Amino acid sequence: MSRLFRAADILLPKTEHPETWAVIACDQHTSEPDYWKKAEELCTEEYSSLDMIIPEARLNEHAEGRIRRVQEAMEKAYDSGWFTEYREAYIYVERTLLDGRIRRGLVGCVDLEQYDYHDHAETMIRATEKTVAERIPPRRAVRQNALLELPHVILLMDDDTVGVMDRITAMRDTLPLLYDFELMLGGGRIRGWLIEKENADAVTAYMDAYMECQKKKFPDCPPLCFASGDGNHSLASAKAAYLQKKAKDPAVGAEGRIERYALVELEDLQDPVQVFEPIHRVLFDIDTDTLLHSLRILTKEDGMPFRLVIGEQEYTMYLDTKSYGYQLGVLQPFLDAYCAAYGGRMDYIHGEETVRQLARQPRTAGFLLEPLSKDGFFRNIAKSGVYPRKTFSIGEAEEKRYYMEARRIKER
């Protein structure tokens, strides 16, 4: 069987200004166009990853033209010699967050044959949250004929046995430092070290040991080795594009073919720095009195608390979560049904202050939720399937993955 996670041929930009190359994940700041305007103003002097992605806030603006420009930018940068390629390598990443914590990751390739994003999948790589099928086609369209991929996917491992990240950290001082810089617009600092040759072989052995342990972890469930923590719709789009190519040319499915894999950053759920942040909800264009009345029928006094923000008012309400163990198991079906019955538009927001600012608008309400517990996180997925969409986030918005590494996904 092909390895689930393996070394890759990784591209990095040749630039003295990596801070203008690396931009935040495309699915962030979806209701804040000013953020993306500021990013555009910073990325004017040379190639930027912003030229090679489509921010979700602008996904439907002149879609075909944008996709064509993204793919042309990839071709132009690659053909100009903009990238250095590191063959059969991993990159060990340390991200210094704004509060000084360091989040560790390992960039490599995941086998799309072993990944399934559907609700009750039994593959060894799965989604953590419900995938919205409608969000896949525009992302698949970007990837379908693209020369390169630039990942913002964070894949989670649940390593309470081997200590893969600790072993990699122990070898860090012997590794070549590839980059070290401050990320734009408050993203903190990032450093990356090259892992190749015998060091890459050692990391591969650590990963193999971890996967063997995971296969035995839940004897009553199909084994689960990895779960997508961030960027699942991008990973799902990669799978959809791969299957489409494979249907036209079965040779694409052969082990080792570049189309069969996707570049991701792997992080450990058990690392103390990993914090699950809630993804809050904001409803726009609604009658707030009707919403309040409907919520008072739904809520229970002895349940799990959440906060509702309307204008300058903040209400504490409670949900009976005994059947699910987390708030969105109850709240998300209510919000979906409410919008279907009364109209309105829902957005998913990182950060309490952003929710409060948006909730000051007329006919708007913000739902401030509690973080999801990490206890039993993988077992819940293995046993009961995925969580509702946008249940959790790894860190705040500014802590999301920035586009740094790239990989060629089309033969030339």
Image (spheres, rainbow, N blue to C red):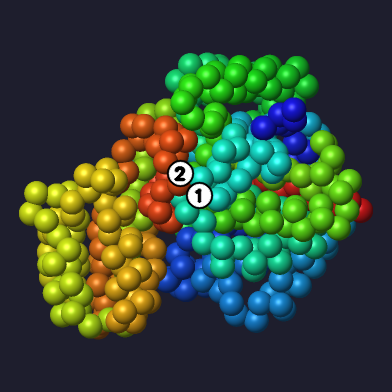
* CA distance separating discs 2 and 1: 5 Å
Q: What residue type is disc 1 on? A: Asp
Please state the horizontal and vertical placement of residue 160, each as a whole percent of the image. Answer: 45, 20
Q: Earlier in the sequence, mark 2 or mark 1?
A: 1
The residue at the point 42 percent across, 28 percent down is: 270
Name the foreground residue: 5 vs 395. 5
Q: Report the residue marked by disc 2.
A: 385
Q: Position of residue 24 (x, y in %)?
A: 53, 56
Residue drawn at (54%, 31%), measured in percent from left and top? 222
Residue that protrudes farthest toward the right in the picture: 412
Q: Are marks 2 and 1 in contact (CB under 8 Å)?
A: yes
Answer yes or no: is residue 319 visible. yes
On the rendered structure, is 291 left or right of 150?
A: left
- Crowding at label 1, few (<14), some or many (≥20) Cα neighbours within 10 Å? some
**Residue labelled with disc 1:** 119
Circle 2 Cα neighbour tier, 10 Å, few/some/many (<14 / 14–19 / ≥20): many
Q: Quadrant of the N terminus?
A: top right
